[in-house]
Image: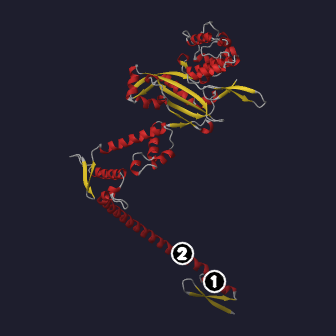
């Protein structure tokens, strides 16, 4: 029995497939007729070829469109540039809110500056003559704009100098940016333009800070610390003609003073600052103290070594090699002058209460009155001598007039002694020196020293007055010289009373 049916192909045609019960006839028919899978594969190949052709056509048209678009953009840019050249000067004076003559002087100057720039660019290639000024009228009034090479420089320099003066006054007066802005905004409009805005001050401050680079100190507490390059500071200072002439008058010998000190800014945070000044200037006020480093931290040997290590390295390098600025070589001679605590720490010496505390390497037990050894001569008095006024005068006269003080310490010996294990072997050198300034160029800060001595002397006088019940006499004498001073009694928690007095620094102390 023969059965057959029709199958429609994808291409729209049709073919007949016959099925026979006879196996041999069906196999022969399958071999002669194409299968459905082959028809599908042929159709897929055809569609893929059409897709590739369409993609090629699409890419070709896209490239053509991009070329046309680029040509249009270039033509539009040229037309826009021509339009800006034609009406650029006019747009400078166009303002939808105010007329030109209703603007503030600063706003009018800004518009004039733009006109000057446009005209200067237009006549930049002209060499036959030099433009001097521009004259034109705006709303019936004449406007004159200088066009010389230095026309805008004088105005800009004047504005820059004003900004610098205001910035200096602001810093010296400790005026914050917020307070300065509020003060400027409180002025009338006409007077407000006299003071530069806070944004201009910030730009000038950043410009000045960029002249000498600032380097962070990551070893400081929470990384809060910065330092500056000493050579960069000296290069800027020696470019000033007055300082340069002063140093060259001494045979190009640059004498510098290095100093550092720490103070406690809060209960938990301390601050250490290092500065230097040029001794050739003979000006020792705060305006001529040039900061080198500032960081938050403790004033101890290890922290100072880690935080100020690069500073000490620069000091040592300048001490050995000097510095060259503008082709002139300067010999650098350093002097170290600080309080006793920092001096002892920088040179790795023992504390002032130690046996070998003096920079002359003498032991404390031989620093007696009238005794001189091979190292130095100093004077040490017992506190009982302070009870008499005459003896106090003798003490001050003899203590401060020491004419013979040879110093036997040297840096090499200190480095060698610091490795010893015994006190007598170290001779007070418990650490290696951090700085290479010789001991002969170390100057003890007499201000701190004399204040401490006078404080101890005054304390002995107060004890003497209290013991002799003569407190009213001391109060009267200090009042005669204009020093407020009072004794008073304070009740303690246990019920007892203590005598307290007003110290010279305004704080109260008790005996």
Q: Residue furthest left?
A: 128
Question: Left or right: 128 with respect to 264?
Answer: left
User: Which residue lies at the image location 77% right of the left edge and 32% below the top edge?
Assistant: 493
Q: Is residue 243 above or below residue 414?
A: below
Q: Is residue 107 above or below residue 402?
A: below
Residue 348: percent from left, percent from top: 62, 22
User: Which residue does the numbered mark 1 point to in the structure image?
Assistant: 30
Residue 144: percent from left, percent from top: 26, 50
User: Which residue lies at the image location 32% right of the left edge and 63% below the top edge?
Assistant: 79
Tell which of 149 and 290 is nearer to you: 290
Question: Left or right: 244 with respect to 37?
Answer: left
| Number of residue marks | 2
Residue 45 image label: 2
Residue 230: percent from left, percent from top: 49, 30
Quarter occupied by the C terminus = top right
State the CA–CA distance, disc 1 to disc 2. Answer: 23 Å
Element at badge 2?
A: helix
Tell which of 75 and 444 is nearer to you: 444
Q: Quadrant of residue 83?
A: bottom left
Residue 326 image label: none
């Amino acid at each position: 029995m023969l059965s057959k049916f029709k199958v429609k192909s994808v291409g729209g045609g049709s073919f007949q497939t016959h099925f026979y019960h006879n196996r041999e006839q069906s196999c022969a028919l399958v071999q002669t007729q194409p299968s459905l899978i082959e028809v599908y594969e042929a159709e897929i190949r055809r569609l893929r070829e059409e897709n590739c052709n369409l993609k090629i056509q699409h890419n070709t048209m896209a490239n053509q469109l991009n070329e046309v678009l680029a040509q249009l953009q270039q033509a539009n840019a040229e037309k826009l540039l021509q339009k800006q050249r034609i009406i650029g000067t006019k747009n400078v004076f166009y303002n939808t809110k105010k007329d030109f003559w209703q603007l503030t002087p600063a706003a009018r100057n800004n518009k004039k500056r733009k006109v000057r720039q446009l005209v200067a660019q237009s006549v930049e290639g002209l060499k036959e003559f030099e433009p001097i000024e521009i004259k034109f009228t705006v709303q019936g009034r004449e406007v004159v704009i200088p066009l010389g090479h230095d026309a805008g420089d004088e105005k800009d320099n004047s504005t820059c100098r004003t900004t610098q003066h205001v910035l200096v006054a602001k810093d010296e007066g400790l005026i914050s940016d917020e307070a300065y802005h509020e003060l400027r905004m409180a002025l009338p409009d006409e007077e407000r333009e006299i003071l530069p805005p806070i944004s201009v001050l910030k730009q000038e401050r950043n410009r000045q800070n960029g002249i000498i680079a600032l380097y962070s100190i990551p070893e400081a507490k929470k990384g809060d610390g910065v330092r500056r390059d000493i050579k960069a500071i000296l290069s800027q200072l020696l470019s000033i003609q007055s300082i340069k002439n002063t140093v060259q008058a001494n045979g190009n010998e640059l004498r510098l003073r290095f100093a550092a000190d720490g103070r406690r800014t809060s209960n938990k945070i301390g601050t250490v600052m290092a500065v230097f000044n040029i001794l050739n200037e003979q000006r020792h006020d705060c305006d001529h103290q040039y900061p080198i480093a500032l960081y938050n931290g403790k004033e101890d040997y290890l922290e100072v070594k880690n935080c100020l290590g690069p500073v000490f390295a620069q000091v040592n390098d300048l001490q050995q090699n000097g510095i060259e600025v503008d082709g002139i070589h300067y010999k650098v001679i350093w002097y170290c002058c600080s309080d006793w605590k920092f001096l002892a720490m920088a040179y790795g010496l023992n504390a002032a209460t130690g046996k070998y505390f003096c920079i002359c390497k003498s032991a404390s037990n031989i620093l007696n009155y009238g005794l001189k050894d091979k190292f130095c001569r100093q004077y040490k008095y017992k506190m009982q001598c302070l009870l008499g006024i005459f003896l106090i005068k003798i003490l001050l006269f003899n203590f401060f007039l020491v004419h013979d003080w040879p110093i036997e310490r040297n840096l090499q010996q200190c480095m060698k002694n610091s490795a010893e294990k015994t006190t007598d072997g170290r001779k007070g050198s418990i650490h290696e020196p951090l700085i290479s300034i010789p001991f002969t160029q170390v100057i003890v800060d007499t201000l701190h020293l004399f204040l401490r001595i006078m404080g101890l002397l005054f304390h002995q006088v107060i004890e003497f007055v209290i013991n002799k019940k003569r407190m009213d006499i001391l109060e009267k004498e200090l009042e005669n010289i204009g020093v407020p001073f009072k004794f008073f009694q304070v009740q303690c928690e246990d019920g007892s009373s203590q005598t307290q007095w007003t110290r010279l620094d305004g704080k109260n102390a008790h005996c």
